[in-house]
Structure formats: structure tokens, C-alpha cells
Amino acid sequence: MKQLYLTLEDVNVSGRTVLVRVDINSPIDPDTGKVQSDTRIRLHAKTLKELADHKAKVVVLAHQGRKGDPDFVPLKSHAETLEKVLGRPVKYVDDVAGEKAVKAVKELKPGEILLLENVRFHPDETVNRSSEEHAQSQLVKSLAALADLFVLDGFSVAHRSHASVVGFTHLLPSVAGRVMEAELSVMDKITKEVKKPFLCLLGGSKVEKGSEFVEFLLSKNVDLILTGGLAGNLLLYARGVNLGEANLEVLKRKRLLEHAERMGEVLERNPGKVKVPVDVAVKADDGRRVELKVSELPSEHLICDIGSETISLYVEAVRKAETIFVTGPMGIYEEEAFSKGTFEVFKAIADSNAFSVASGGHTVSALRQFDLAGKFTYTSIAGGAFLEHMMGKRLPGVEGLKAAAERWRKA
């Protein structure tokens, strides 16, 4: 079968300037602005090392956070972390596509790596346009003029039609990096190897696509969906549970309440298939873990984890499953007092014989924190892109690579 996209095996990078779009969006310490987890950086370091070892001039494009969010910060700490991971110098410039960036790219020597500033600082980046339209943007035109090749390594951003994801594929020879290649290969296997009972664990805070994904899973005859984290809180709210003003404010701030009505309708149509927490752990004023039954809500304190009874119910469900898909932790796993739910449920999955797949940066970070990452069948740093690809949707980044490969074959 003809390969739909090109990879690093198809190109010679020696002496060439290579633009590489990665996804090293990482948890950030709010006090220092420093990277707290190097999970994504370590994964993409493999592609960057291979390019540098083959004497490419490597120019890295990446983002951090979203405009208006606390973690929307420069990439200086990312460059320092990448340098430690690689064990070799990594240059950094606080500019995306202006004079400083252009000068830094032109001065690169074979085997050197340069990380440009947070690409979302540039106004062209996050406008949703086609690859043809993005190809005419200042961001893309400025950098494409300096490069010989584009490598898309960030599968986790491939669902976004952003300038640095799709614009270069219209102007430059473009290939999939090692992370992208591995993700696409495994995704093909995942969608074809579902043994039942099929269980899904839906947690975390990025549940914008939660209702749509839940509906997709139910249409594919998933046997049970277990929820926790903000996803669980949102479903409790959709069921009419009064969470308390502090917890409601979090859902508002994360722009999740708009999904509550649809979530409620999904629950009504599928009684028994979607489980919500029966008890939760809240953070007392002194930081202690206090468990409450859902019937004891609302609480003036933040819900930070699922409770012990919910953990037991979820662990029992995990033991009966043959296929398990996980997206998102069960609570604020970074804090020891509220890591219990995530650890115990994830450990039950790791100890099972099920075909287990985990997706999303926070999910993978939690697995690494608990030393469980190697015990799942497969772990993916992608979140939204993973879900969309599972649902059979076309990802702009992948489509851009396919179109670039087709143009290359015709040339």
C-alpha cells in the first residue's frame, strides 16, 4: 500500500535548514515560570537529536499555553530543559519570525539546534485558516524562505489548523517526525484491536470535546465510561448536583459549562453506561484531604479527587475490562493528598492484562510520576488530536503532510 505521508527516511537533512514543529507544551510552575515536567520534551528530543546528529540546522517551533492563561509564557525554560535532556547546547531567541529570529536562523551551523519563541506570541499563529491561506502569512513566509524542509512532529497539535502546523506544508517539502510517525502507526492498531468489555476512563481538565467523544464511544458500543477530574465534576453538574460556588467557578473559568446540557442529554439516553463519582475529596482550608459523599455537596472547598468508595468501584470495573482507554487523571495528582484516585485506578489498569491506551500530556505525566508509564500497552502525549483521530476526523496537520507527499511524488 502506498505510504500516505513521507518520513525522515525519505529525505537527506545534512547541511539543510529544517523547521520542526513539536509540542512541548508543559506544566509550568506559577511562581517561577519554569517547566515542571519534561515528559513531552523527552519524547520530541529523539527527533531533534536524530536531525542534529545528521548535521541538520535544526529550528524548533513550539507553543506554551494559550493567550490569557497563566501558563502562556516564553520558552526560555523549555530551551534549558531541552538542553539538559539532550546533553548538548540548545540556542534560544525571544522572537518568532522577526529580525532577531531570522538572524539566529541564518547563523546556525550544521548540527546546531535553535528554539524560537512561543509561536503563539505571533498574531498569525492561532487564526484558523487553510494551509494555502497560512502560507501567505508573515510568520510562514519569513521562516519558509530560510528553510529547506519542514518536519511535523507534534501529533498532539495536528488537529489545529494553525500557521505553524499547516502553513509550511504548502511551501516546503514536508515529512512526519518520529513522534508523529509512531502516533499514527499506533492509532491505526488501536482502532482495529478493540476487545470487549471495553472501558473508557474520562478525566482531566481538557474536556471541551468530552460530550462528543462520549457519544462516539457509546456509538461504538463501549461497555462503560468512568469519569473523574473536571470531567466528573461537569457530569455531576449535568445531573443536577450542586457542587458549590468555588467548583462552579472553576467550570466557568475553563469554559466547560456550555457542554453541560449536551452531557446531560447523553446521560439520559444511556442510563448505566456512564458512571460519575459517588464521593469526592475536597481540599480543606489547611490543605487536608476531606472526603464527602456526593449527597453531602455542595462544598465551599474545591473538589480535588474522587473519593475512596468511587476508587473501589472503578478498580473493580477495571479488573473486568479487556480494552481500556484513558484520557485524563482523576484529580490533582500533583498534590500527594489528592493523588490517591489517579494512582490507584491507574495502577489497577497497569496490573491488568487489558489492552490499555493512555492519551494526553497530563495523563502521561501522572503515569511517569507513579512509575507506571511502561506498564500500559501504549501511551500518547496527544489529547484532543488523539480523540479526533479516533473518531475518524481529518486532522489538518496530517492532511497537510499527505498533500505535501502527493506534490513531492508528482514533481
Image: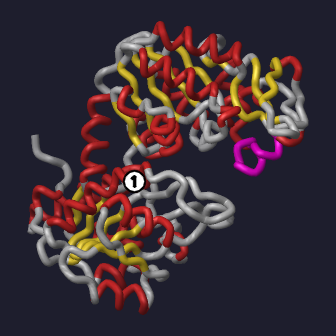
**Along the horizontal axis of the image, is 205 left or right of 17?**
right
User: Is residue 215 rendered magenta in the image?
Assistant: no
Element at label 1: loop
Question: At 66% across and 39% down in the image, what residue appears?
Answer: 335
Q: Nearer the viewer, residue 57 or 375?
A: 375
Please name the colour scheme applied to the rendered image.
Answer: secondary structure
Q: Amino acid at mark 1?
A: Ala
In-front residue for pair 299/215: 299
Please give left or right for residue 62 compared with residue 14 in the image.
Answer: right
Specify the segment rendered in magenta.
247-257
Q: Is residue 254 visible?
A: yes
| Overall secondary structure of the magenta section | helix
Q: Position of residue 232 (x, y in %)?
A: 68, 29
- Quarter that holds the C terminus: bottom left
Name which residue lies at 64% across and 65% down.
32
Q: Quadrant of residue 138?
A: bottom left
Res 220 quadrant in image: top left
Q: Is residue 150 left or right of residue 356?
A: left
Does 49 sit left or right of 83 as displayed? left
* x then y, percent, for residue 185: 25, 39
* Residue named by callout 1: 158
Vertical comparison of 162 with 279: above or below: below
162 versus 399 height, above or below: below
The residue lying at 35 percent from left, 20 percent from top is: 355
Q: Position of residue 362 (x, y in %)?
A: 53, 43
Front residue of this view, candidates 241 and 74: 74
Picture residue at 50% right of the left edge, 14% below the top: 318
Q: Is residue 269 visible?
A: no
